[in-house]
Image (cartoon, grey):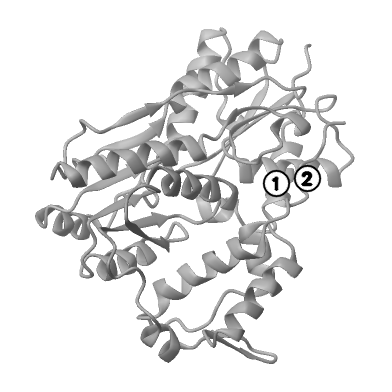
Amino acid sequence: MLDSGIQPGRKKADKIYNWLRAYIDENKFSSNQRLPSENELCRRLDVSRETVRAAMARLVEENLVTRVKGSGTYINKDAAVSGPARSLNAEYKIGLILQGQDSHANSRLIDGIRDVMSDTDVDLQIFFTDNKFSNERNCLDVVAHQGFDGFIVDGVKASLLNPNLDCYRNIFAKKIPVIFYNNYYKELNYPRVINNDYKCARELIGLLTRAGHKKIAGIFVYDNYQSIEKFRGYVGSLRSAGLKFEDDYIKWCISNEAHADGFYKEIGKFLKGLPKCTAIVCCNYMILQSVLHFLQENGKSVPNDYSLVCFDYSGQDWERSGITCSIHPGYDMGIQVGKRLLKMIQNHEYCGNGYSYLMDLRIYEGRSIRKL
């Protein structure tokens, strides 16, 4: 059986510390005072409890948070607001607005952005939306009035009608450069750096159909622009292979649902209702983890019981895991969005798609597909 991949990789405490500092910066002007629980941080950031506690201890030492026994950990807002200003003399102040749900992908993206900006005096400030419209609006309301020179954004529920377009139009009116990555809003004339998810789907599902698979389940999120493109490619690949598309073989979910602790149980119910299913398409790395969790708990193996393919594998262990996948271009994507935004700022260009970029595909053919 292939490596399940559900054991979280080790993360350094300073990365969790930086995540928590960004969370405090985002919330120091809001009514929110409580940090996520240790359990929630372990799940969200895919790290051990020891790592979270080490980062928390550092924040306590700096008087940025206070622990209340039996209640939780709370932001010390007086200390957060009155603390030393960050890089006030930097040449450029750039905001990075992340969904924050895939810590693997976010970490590599941030590394790429920082590396490409290493020769430029940049204050990079990170904000998290958790893929929620209300959090995105809070971020935009704060950063739009604090003298930022540009923004890098992963859009929130980009396949739905966004209620925050007025905030972006306000930023547009101020001629502040913005570049999107992964998910963008079609109503806005801003550049974007994205994957060719449709082409990627044609290649991944094509590997399954050429191996003889005809009953292929797909798990997709409907509020995500990337996932919609992946679904289009899934359907196109089936039709090219002369196979019939069946609605019952698709499980739709929303992004937040897909990241919940018990989602693997919902996947189990779905798969058990498909007795003829021989292969599963996972539209992202987090969904893959839930599928592997279900299979492991029910004594199923890959590829003997189910063949698997996965989009946007953001862990660094794809060869060890053996999962046939598209590899998430986190670091390279960070390089691309970072250098394009810098050019926009330096050239005083803030709109148009002349700075857009389509990332190259990188497919890893592992050991997770059985030939029928």
Give the residue pinned by disc 1. 290
- Looking at the rendered structure, which numbered label has been put on residue 360? none
In the image shown, does 270 or 51 lie closer to the viewer? 51
- Toward which corner of the image does residue 232 lie, by quadrant? top left
Res. 184 in view: no
Q: Residue at x 71, y 11 (%)?
A: 211
In the image shown, does 290 or 155 lie closer to the viewer? 155
Kindly check if marks 1 and 2 are in contact, taking CB atoms under 8 A apart as contact: yes
- Toward which corner of the image does residue 141 lie, by quadrant? bottom left
Where does the image place residue 253, in percent across and percent down from the top left? 54, 47
Relative placement, left or right, of 284 versus 6 is left
Give the residue pinned by disc 2. 294
Relative placement, left or right, of 263 versus 63 is right
Q: Residues within 10 Å of mark 1 (few under 14, many from 20)?
A: many
Going by the numbered disc 2, the residue's amino acid type is: Phe
Q: Mark 1 falls on what kind of element?
A: helix
Res. 83 in view: yes
196, above or below 96, in the image = above
Q: CA distance from mark 1 to mark 2?
A: 6 Å
- Toward which corner of the image does residue 340 lie, by quadrant? top left
252, above or below 150, in the image = above
Going by the numbered disc 1, the residue's amino acid type is: Ser
**Quarter of the image containing the C terminus?**
top right
Q: Residue at x 53, y 15 (%)?
A: 237
**Quarter of the image containing the N terminus?**
top right
Relative placement, left or right, of 95 versus 126 is left
In the image shown, does 372 or 343 lie closer to the viewer? 343
Residue furthest toward the front?
119
Q: Residue at x 23, y 40 (%)?
A: 343
Q: Residue at x 13, y 45 (%)?
A: 348
